[in-house]
Image (cartoon, helix red, strand yellow):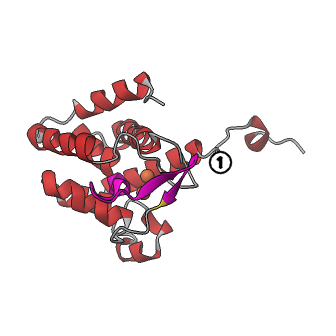
């Protein structure tokens, strides 16, 4: 199944917002698109977007919502930071070129037991920072993007920078939409007894 043209356009538009670190980004994109499962990987094995291209669709959704939210709440943050954090917060899900994190089995995906285990967020930070120099805020946002859903993230409770709060919310919101939990219904919001 081919990646929807609409997602491809949004992806290219997001990439074009990176100006300061354009060259580094191009190298990273070249690596991701030619050596890893970046464009085909699912976003998960059984939760949200556990389908081909799920990861890129989710990443585009998160980066797009981050830009919308930051324009509303804190426009001082550059688009570039939202693109790098939003697009690559889950890039660790590709695993490594020689060991993808998810493997296609029959019509679904399974976790690759052969890989060296590193958490998704840590691998995301590891992969991005091999190619792109990050600000401290961007590094915090990528590594702790799951927010307080993850016990180990307790160390940054109440110490989150704005970019971290933005990615955590955008990620949670988009994942809830993608897996069908977020169904806007008038019945819920305008309940009459
Ligand atoms: Fe994640
Ligand atoms: Fe995510």
Between 20 and 1, the residue placed more toward the observer is: 1
**Residue at the farthest right position:** 193
Between 122 and 65, the residue placed more toward the observer is: 122
Q: Please, what secondary structure does the residue beneath circle 1 have?
A: loop
Residue 136 quadrant: bottom left
Q: Residue at x 51, y 58 (%)?
A: 110
**x, y (%) of residue 146?**
43, 61
**x, y (%) of residue 74?**
32, 44
- Please give the count of numbered marks on the rendered protein: 1
**x, y (%) of residue 90?**
37, 53
Between 95 and 49, the residue placed more toward the observer is: 95
Q: Which residue is mark 1?
A: 181
Q: Residue at x 39, y 43 (%)?
A: 59
In the image, which residues are magenta? 89-110
42 magenta-colored? no
Between 29 and 86, the residue placed more toward the observer is: 29
Quarter of the rendering occupied by the C terminus: top right
**Residue at the farthest front position:** 106
Q: Is residue 179 left or right of residue 34?
A: right
Does residue 77 show up? no
**x, y (%) of residue 25?**
16, 42
Q: Residues within 10 Å of mark 1 (few under 14, many from 20)?
A: few
Does residue 189 show up? yes
Q: Is mark 1 within 8 Å of ligand 2?
A: no
């Amino acid at each position: 199944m081919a990646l929807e043209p609409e997602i491809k356009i949004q992806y290219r538009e997001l990439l074009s917002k990176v100006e300061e670190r354009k060259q580094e980004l191009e190298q990273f994109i070249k690596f991701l698109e030619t050596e890893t499962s970046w464009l085909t990987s699912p976003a998960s094995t059984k939760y949200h977007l556990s389908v081909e291209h799920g990861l890129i669709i989710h990443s585009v959704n998160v980066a797009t919502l981050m830009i919308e939210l930051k324009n509303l709440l804190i426009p001082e943050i550059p688009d570039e930071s939202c693109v790098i954090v939003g697009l690559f917060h889950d890039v660790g899900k590709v695993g490594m070129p020689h060991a993808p994190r998810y493997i296609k089995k029959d019509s679904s995906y399974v976790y690759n037991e052969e890989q060296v285990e590193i958490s998704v967020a840590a691998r995301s930070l590891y992969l991005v920072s091999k190619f792109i120099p990050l600000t401290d805020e961007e590094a915090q946002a990528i590594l702790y993007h799951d927010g307080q859903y993850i016990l180990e993230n307790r160390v940054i409770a109440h110490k989150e920078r704005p970019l971290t709060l933005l990615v955590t919310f955008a990620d949670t919101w988009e994942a809830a939409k993608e897996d069908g939990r977020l169904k806007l219904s008038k019945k819920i919001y305008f309940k009459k007894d």
